[in-house]
Image: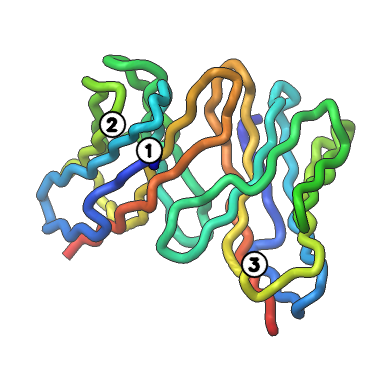
Amino acid sequence: QQQVKQSPQSLIVQKGGIPIINCAYENTAFDYFPWYQQFPGKGPALLIAIRPDVSEKKEGRFTISFNKSAKQFSLHIMDSQPGDSATYFCAASRTNTGKLIFGQGTTLQVKP
Amino acid sequence: DGGITQSPKYLFRKEGQNVTLSCEQNLNHDAMYWYRQDPGQGLRLIYYSQIVNDFQKGDIAEGYSVSREKKESFPLTVTSAQKNPTAFYLCASHSGAGNYGYTFGSGTRLTVV
């Protein structure tokens, strides 16, 4: 019930491609779904987040798609660049706890 | 600039030794968290604190201890009871006021020698 399952574990795309990372959750009480980006040797940084009252949110080249009925959400990176090469984590939480449950992470490599 | 400072960046522990990882924030955040990161396992919650002088166990608290005597500080002690402590440790915080975007520190890499 508390798990967030993330796939794929790793992903390689060419520059300009659109990598898609997927996450699924079980707990319907979750109401906050952020994505974090982590570079090697650094802490994760908040990239974009969505709440379940919307089905899509865009910030620059990053888009979250949210499917409440399927209990799934995904991150799309438009026009990917080598500088986007990093590990991406999805997460979920309930507003009244604030405690984030993280997915297992996806290592993305964007080839020039 | 506001943020979270973790120290040291690298730490080496001998077998049977306790070590303490520092986490300090100047964001005036109420809640603070410790996560452990291992390759392929994501971020696993060790301990968290939502208010001074109170803290809760996370999913993997065995072999770890914490204190929260000041709002700004949330140190983590890795005790000798933690049999496999080699990992990357991350501290995070959030304001708790309906905003759950965590701010993370830059981490401490702990290695057993």
- Residue at 48% across / 24% down in the picture? B95
Q: For the residue labelled by badge 2, is the local secondary structure a helix, a strand or a loop?
A: loop
Residue A33's x, y, as percent? Answer: 69, 36
Q: Please provide percent x and percent y for residue A64.
A: 79, 46
Q: Which residue is mark 3?
A: A84
Q: State which mark lies toward you, 2 or 3.
A: 3
Disc 1 to disc 2: CB gap under 8 Å = yes
Gap in angstroms between the C-alphas marked 1 and 2 = 9 Å
B41 vs B113: above or below: above
What secondary structure is found at the residue carrying circle 3? Answer: helix
- Callouts 2 and 3 close, C-beta under 8 Å: no
The image quadrant where one finds the C terminus of chain A is bottom right
Most extreme residue toward the front is B1
Reading the image, the residue beneath label 1 is B34
Q: Quadrant of residue B101?
A: top right
Q: Amino acid at mark 3?
A: Asp
Q: Which mark is residue B74?
A: 2
Mark 1: which amino acid?
A: Trp
